[in-house]
């Protein structure tokens, strides 16, 4: 019994050590979150501009989640200027901000 417990802890420790030393990165690991006020929404171009410290333009991906203040999924056209939003995004290889999630925190 003690031998099995010792082997279990050795395997567990090895797994933790390997994952800490050799992290696996994928595109989703580099997501960033910002919040601010919506300045412009262009549903036909799948773009939204949010005022944070500066104006930031986001391309809203086709599979992006857009969530209203009640937690329901909505279309980009349901986001209005003046809404306070949180945007989860990553930068593509051209430096463009690609929105994966847009959450309306509250409407003004």
Image: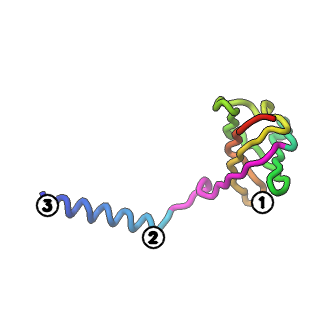
Q: Which residue is mark 1?
A: 94
Q: Which mark is residue 2?
A: 3
Q: Are marks 3 and 2 in contact (CB under 8 Å)?
A: no
- Residue 44, picture quadrant: top right
Q: Nearer the viewer, mark 3 or mark 1?
A: 3
Q: Earlier in the sequence, mark 3 or mark 2?
A: 3
Q: Nearer the viewer, mark 3 or mark 2?
A: 3
Q: Residues within 10 Å of mark 1 (few under 14, many from 20)?
A: few
Q: Nearer the viewer, residue 52 or 30?
A: 52
At which x and y percent is residue 51? 83, 50
Q: Which mark is residue 79?
A: none
- Residue 68, picture quadrant: top right
At which x and y percent is residue 21? 45, 70
Element assignment for label 1: loop
Q: Which mark is residue 21?
A: 2
Is 32 placed above or below 6 here? above
Q: Are marks 2 and 1 in contact (CB under 8 Å)?
A: no
Is 93 placed above or below 62 here? below
At which x and y percent is residue 9? 26, 62
Residue span colored magenta: 24-38
Q: Nearer the viewer, residue 90 or 104?
A: 104
Instruction: Using residue 4 as the reference point, say whether residue 61 is left or right of it.
Output: right
């Amino acid at each position: 019994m003690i031998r099995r417990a010792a082997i279990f802890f050795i395997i567990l420790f090895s797994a933790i050590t390997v994952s800490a030393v050799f992290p696996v990165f994928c595109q989703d690991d580099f997501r960033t979150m910002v919040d601010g006020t919506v300045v412009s929404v262009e549903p036909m171009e799948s773009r939204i501009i949010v005022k944070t410290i500066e104006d930031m333009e986001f391309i809203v991906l086709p599979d992006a989640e857009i969530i209203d203040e009640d937690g329901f999924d909505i279309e980009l056209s349901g986001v209005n200027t003046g809404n306070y939003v949180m945007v989860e995004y990553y930068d593509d290889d051209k430096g463009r901000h690609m929105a994966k999630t847009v959450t309306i925190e509250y409407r003004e």
